[in-house]
Image: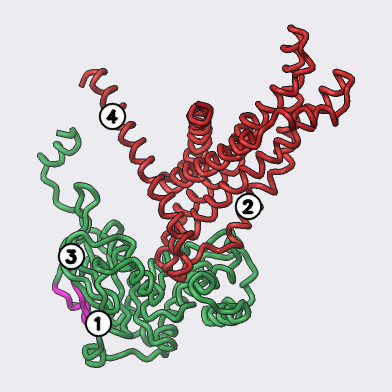
Amino acid sequence: MQAEIDYAQHIAALRAQSPATRPTEAELKVRSRVVEVDRLDFSFGPRQVLFDISLDVREGEIMVIMGGSGSGKTTLLRHLVGLMPPQPGKVKLLGKDLGSLKPAQLLDLKRKIGVAFQFGALFSSMTVAENVKLPLRELTDLEETTMDIMANLKLEVVNLSGFGALMPAALSGGMVKRASIARAIVMDPRLLFLDEPSSGLDPVVSSALDDLILKLREAMDISVVVVSHDIDSAFKIADRITVLDQGHILAIERVENIHNCGNERVRNLLNRRSVEPEVDPAEYLARLTGG
Amino acid sequence: MSVAIRAFESIGRRSVGFFDQVGYGSTLFAEALYWLAVGWRRRQPVRIHAVFHEMQQIGVAALPIATLLSGTIGLMLAIQSLYSLGLFGAEAYAYIGIALSVVREFSPLIMAILVAGRSGSAIAARLATMTINQEVDALQVMGINPVRYLVSPVVVALALMLPCLAMWANLVSELTAGLYVSAALNSSLGAFVNDSLTVLKVGDVWHGIGKAGLFGVLIALVAVVNGSSVSGGAEGVGRVTTWSVVQSICMIVVADMVFAYVATR
């Protein structure tokens, strides 16, 4: 019981660090769904990675998908951004079913979403500014000067103004993540997906990145889906948290309620407690011997 | 499992892998042509500056080494021709063999091998690194078709620049061969050039240029197929780069033989 009281205080303290306004549960409930996943399964060959995943994200909501390593977070994200076609199941973005869209319609839809990858995925042969301008250059007919202005504006938003002329190799880990976010928002998307934004960053930089995510939601009125295993970061930015474990959704809860979740494995994850799975000796022996 | 069955299984797996790659390469080629033809209608044109950039890298930047190689080939052919024809006292006819073999065979073949080693490997390594760094995924989620952005410019640039390099190699090889032959036979360079032009037909030049264009497309597809099927990090990049050069050269030689057989019958 003591741990739960501590968690409530801990969450409140983390959220108090940012002055950003957050939509209430009632406000979010009446907003439209911008992401809908319905009974999604996925297997790599004989190994099933996702089991019957269903979730939704409301307009203007920040949803954090949490889970340990190998829980299927990144595979789920790849489905959400259209990099993997749903096998059984449906993924809808902004009301459109990814599985039934024609290639041209899919391209149009992708202009309305932004994705920042775990390691940035910046083009190493281009400067930071060229990276940010790339979607504008390839997908619009804007003048070069307009593109420059827009790129500088987005670099300013992520606190990277003055770094546009540098090559990605010259940036620190946190700067690469911010540049990647600048590229993801340059087309003013309605939906932003972030893959492990705080991984590999020190707590101060990680906290600054959390503030940036909250600022972006407020300034651009976008919905954000964050895949992360950083519990503090999730508590600070999320409206709701989805907990994944071995491809199964264990909980989808408002962040204030997640510590009340009755699921033992969710509580273990929140308490950073590792639990050795029970192993049947006969099965273990068979696995070792390949029998 | 017996050794024979394992060997049979290995051959089967490799054969399936080969046909899988051929199918993938053909699909990529068709898709690259598709984006060239209709990209502008779908608001995703193949950017001309991207094509020019590739052409500069593949063709213009290769001119010094191409000049050195083709000049050396011209000299080597002149030396061998004078020696072999000298056995019959027919050195004066060296221009026939030199002109025809340079224009029909040596220029496209040597330039293709040069470009496979120089640019094919670079393209494979670049694509492999981009794939590993999720840059190709980034293109896809931005709504930028990776084939249109990465493959089409390379295919066009190689298909255009290899014939250009072959033509340049024709000029340089003929020049160096002419200089050597005229010096050795105590005749003029002008006479060598004149004799060469009388023996060469337009069809011979087209034969060489056509082959070079075909080799260019082959190098592009082999590099792209290898680069995009990378796995295993930095070691994987090295592996696909090496494999790209080996496969390109093998395919160039086989295609050369088939082309020569079909075109000379």
Q: Is residue B37 above or below residue B121?
A: below
Per the rendering, the mark at residue A3 is none
Query: Label 4 amino acid?
Result: Gly
Q: Is residue A161 above or below residue B58?
A: below
Q: Which residue is mark 2?
A: B55
Which of the chains bears the disc numbered 1?
A: A
Instruction: Judge depth for marks 3 and 2 and give the one in front.
Output: 2
**Mark 1 neighbour class, 10 Å CA radius: few under 14, some 14 to 19, many 20 or more:** some
Which of the chains bears the disc numbered 2?
A: B
Is residue A266 something that shows in the picture? yes
Q: Within the magenta stretch, is there residue A253?
A: yes
- In magenta, the rendered stretch is A248-262
Instruction: Judge depth for marks 2 and 1 and give the one in front.
Output: 2
Contact check, label 2 and label 1, Cβ < 8 Å: no
Contact check, label 3 and label 2, Cβ < 8 Å: no
Please tell me if label 2 and label 1 are on a single chain: no
Contact check, label 4 and label 3, Cβ < 8 Å: no
Query: Label 2 amino acid?
Result: Met
Instruction: Judge depth for marks 4 and 3 and give the one in front.
Output: 4
Residue A74 sits in quarter: bottom left
**Mark 4 neighbour class, 10 Å CA radius: few under 14, some 14 to 19, many 20 or more:** few
Gap between marks 4 and 1 measured at Cα: 49 Å
Query: Label 1 amino acid?
Result: Arg
Per the rendering, the mark at residue A89 is 3
Q: Residue at x 79, y 31 (%)?
A: B193
Is residue A232 something that shows in the picture? no
Q: Residue at x 48, y 38 (%)?
A: B239
Kind of element beneath mark 2: helix
